[in-house]
Amino acid sequence: MKSNVYLASKPRYEILDGLRGVAAVLVVAYHLFETYYHGGTSQPINHGYLAVDFFFVLSGFVIGYAYDDRWDRMSTWGFVKRRLIRLHPMVIFGSLFGAALFYFGDCSSFPLIGDTPWYKTALIMLWAFTMIPIPTSMDIRGWGETNPLNGPAWSLQWEYLANFLYAVLFRHFSRKALGACVVLFGIMTLVLCLNIDIFGFLAARSSASYTVIGGWCLSPDQLQIGLTRLLYPFFCGLLLSRTGKLIKVKGGFWWCSAMIVVLLCMPWMGLGPEGNARWTNGLYEAACILVFFPLIVSIGAGSSVKGSTSESINKFLGDISFPLYITHYPLIYMQMAWANSHKDAPTGTHIFVAVSTFLLAILIAYGAYRLYDLPVREWLKKQLFKPATPSDANKTK
């Protein structure tokens, strides 16, 4: 029988933690701008939604690094427990936080909130705790999200699927077999980015055509988009961790951060006077996902911040990255409701509310990490695993 000991965590890639934080901060800013630009092509962080695809590359790389060589000492159930300990406390916190703020978002943009009784909100919250997608028929906000209390949880639902696929299937694949799958998944990404409607699901995507926007509903088109957005980035990251093709660059954190900012802030392409070259935007997003994001992860993993002034910055950003991503959107719902109800307020007031929301999101994320996430994870380790012995610690080195 494989050991039920909680194997010590491996040394972390500090820059990758920091880059996850950089992307999470940009996601918050992107959503704050979205309140006013409504997904329009003049959004200052126009490709902010690609941060999700970057997160998937990071996750695949980290999963491969952390677990590929441990399956002789770890069962599938042990892997599942470790991933639940790492992710699920904040998943629960995010849905609980979303439920607490749910009724403060009541406005015309969210037409179902006002008619939703409290007990249905509580039921949806409990359902959301399981990470099982909520069907559109049970929507309580009006956007059809798989978690109407905390929209960004949709990407964690796909993340859970990726972890399951890795544990039961892809961990057994050789590099060649995994590489062949990654090529196939890359073709799927190109098909989506170029809006090639093979299955007849993408016809209604007019405004989102030639993008990877989507994945947060249970409709056929959204399921195709979500699965496509998951498969190539995650398993490309896994393949990258197995090949060890890392690039060392001096000042790697700053170069990688600059690349992320530029890629996510790049204006929407192919509009022109006729808007007939939108396919160029699809090519751009495909290049980001297929080439640039893996390149950034390779540089981030190959470089170091030890002893540099950016080491503490990386640690802080890494600490708040996941809590920030999974807790900020209930605040965005409230900001949207306020902006909807105060359209005539002075521009300075709107800016003040947006900046305050941003700072509050950072503060809540850090507080949740320190006061909730860390102690809950430590408690769960003690409950679900045996204490490690000196011999167990030696085996992990």
Image (cartoon, helix red, strand yellow):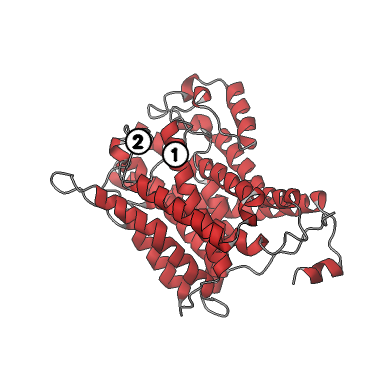
Give residue 370's position: percent from left, percent from top. Answer: 65, 56
Give residue 66's position: percent from left, percent from top. Answer: 65, 62
Left or right: where 64 falls relative to 270: right
Q: Are marks 2 and 1 in contact (CB under 8 Å)?
A: yes
Task: Assign the N terminus to one quadrant of the image.
Answer: bottom right
- Marked residue nearer the N-terminal end (2 or 1): 2
Q: Answer whether residue 355 is visible to the viewer in this image.
A: no
Q: Which residue is mark 1?
A: 224
Q: Answer whether residue 100 is visible to the viewer in this image.
A: yes
Q: Quadrant of residue 153?
A: top right
Q: Quadrant of residue 107?
A: top left
Under circle 1, the secondary element is helix
Residue at (14, 44) in percent of width and height: 274
Q: CA distance from mark 2 to mark 1?
A: 9 Å
Left or right: where 325 falls relative to 128: left
Going by the numbered disc 2, the residue's amino acid type is Leu
Residue at (40, 62) in percent of width and height: 291
Left or right: where 45 falls relative to 149: left
Q: Which residue is mark 2?
A: 202
Going by the numbered disc 1, the residue's amino acid type is Gln
Residue at (76, 57) in percent of width and height: 74
Q: How packed is label 1: few (under 14 Cα within 10 Å), some, or many (20 or more)?
A: some
